Image (tube, rainbow, N blue to C red):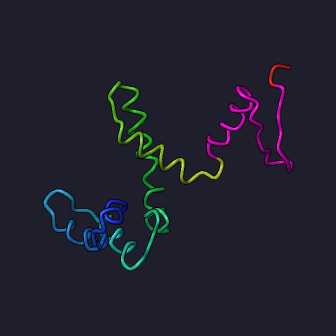
Amino acid sequence: KVAAENFQWEVNLAEVCRIWQGGCIIRSNLLIDLQKALNGKTLVNVLEDETIFQITLDGSWELQKLVMEAVRVGVSAPVAASGYNYFLGVRDAESPANLIQGLRDFFGAHTFERKDKQGIFHENWYE
């Protein structure tokens, strides 16, 4: 999608999903669901579609098990791990990025916001 926008390509992603359904390698009901999700919609992220999000959520445990097993046996699985971590990041309202504010304050007194009180805070982390 981004490449199509940057290079002014007229790419119909729903049509791409339809064409791929006839391929010899990629044959999946997921392509049908993706085609429906992309048909006539302008999604920033395909996970904005409720059906695709639910399919991804339902399969996330299997992906987690795959990543854990790869780590356990010492096999590199960077795409699976990255995909799983990306999904964790987009589905969680309380992301680990919130921790970064505390770390920045600890190392550089950059302040942080709290969820339980209004305002900007700084903590003396050494006391």
91 up-or-down from 64: above or below: below
Q: Residue drawn 28% across and 72% down? A: 10
Residue 18 on image: x %, y %: 24, 72
Q: Quick check: is 15 in the magenta stretch? A: no
Tell me residue 120's x, y (percent). Answer: 82, 44
Q: Nearer the viewer, residue 123 or 26?
A: 123
Q: Quadrant of residue 70?
A: top left
Q: Left or right of 121: which side holds 75?
A: left
Where's the C terminus, which quadrant?
A: top right
Q: Quadrant of the N terminus?
A: bottom left
| In the rendered image, the vertical position of residue 1 relative to residue 64, given as above or below | below
The residue that appears at 21% across and 67% down in the rendered structure is: 21
What number of labels is visible? 0
Q: Please tell me which residue is depicted at 30% across the width and 63% down the height of the picture.
A: 7
State the image coordinates of residue 26 (x, y, percent, origin top left): 21, 59
**Among the 4 quarters of the image, the one containing residue 124:** top right
How far across and down, in percent of the image, does residue 4 sit? 31, 65
Q: Specify the farthest residue to the front.
A: 7
Q: Nearer the viewer, residue 101 or 115?
A: 101
The picture quadrant where one finds residue 108 is: top right
Find out whether residue 111 is within the magenta segment. yes
- Vertical comparison of 7 with 118: above or below: below
View extreme (top): residue: 126
List the single residue furthest toward the bottom.
40
Q: Nearer the viewer, residue 95 or 68?
A: 95
Residue at 40%, 29% (x, y): give it.
71
Region rendered in magenta: 95-124
* 48 left or right of 67 in image: right
